Amino acid sequence: MISSSFTVRVNEQSDFTLDSKNADQFDCEVLEDKKYHILSDSNSYRAELIGEDFGEKSYAIQIGSNVYQVKIETDLDQMIRSMGYKLSSESAANDVKAPMPGIILEMKAQPGDKVKKGDTLLILEAMKMENAILSPKDGVIKSVWSGKGDTVDKNKLLIELE
């Protein structure tokens, strides 16, 4: 039987494992949509979820002026990887498409830029929320199909990687 634990990777550097029992011990209160108050070791933090990619289980969380890229991996994800298979979210996609309709607030990548998997390529505002659109892989920006201020539909091609 697979346990209900998961690995959390922060900024592609720090890994730690949580199980449902540990996760329940976090003192976290929802302040408003995507804004939280967290108590940890007698320290108080305000956190905001500023980007998410549910398919990748990847999130951008801002605490103070710092933004943390957080990736969550379940026991099943780890088992699939240990068997030598790739998770469907790890396919070598060269196209970055809009996950939802919105307005591009900021372009952080330009043609010729080298990017690493998880780097923020652009900020997309959708439903009054800012979403960091992350690079699906290491690569070089081949072309950019939209710019700051553009309105985009869901699945519109935004960036091509090579």
Image: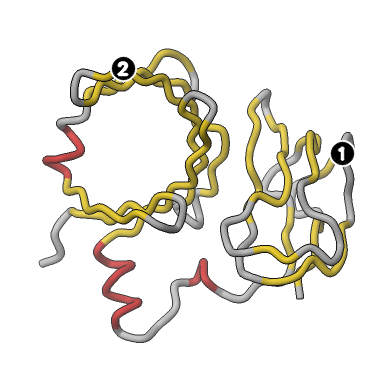
Using the image as rendered, state which of residue 11 and residue 55 is in the foreground.
11
- Where is mark 2, residue-wise? 44
Between marks 2 and 1, how big is the CA–CA gap?
A: 35 Å
Residue 157 as seen in the image, left or right of residue 94: right
Local packing at callout 2 (Cα closer than 10 Å; few below 14, some 14-19, many 20+) is: few
* Residue pictured at 80% horizontal, 59% vertical: 159
**Residue 62, image x and y in percent?**
50, 31
Element type where label 2 sits in the image = strand
Q: Which residue extends farthest bottom?
A: 84
Q: Quadrant of the C terminus?
A: bottom right
Q: Nearer the viewer, mark 2 or mark 1?
A: 2
**Residue 112, image x and y in percent?**
84, 66
Which of pointers 2 and 1 lies earlier in the amino acid sequence? Answer: 2
**Residue 33, image x and y in percent?**
49, 20
* Residue pictured at 49% horizontal, 46% vertical: 69
- Where is mark 1, residue-wise? 148
Using the image as rendered, state which of residue 2 and residue 42 is in the foreground.
42
Q: Quadrant of the N terminus?
A: bottom left
Using the image as rendered, state which of residue 50 and residue 40 is in the foreground.
40
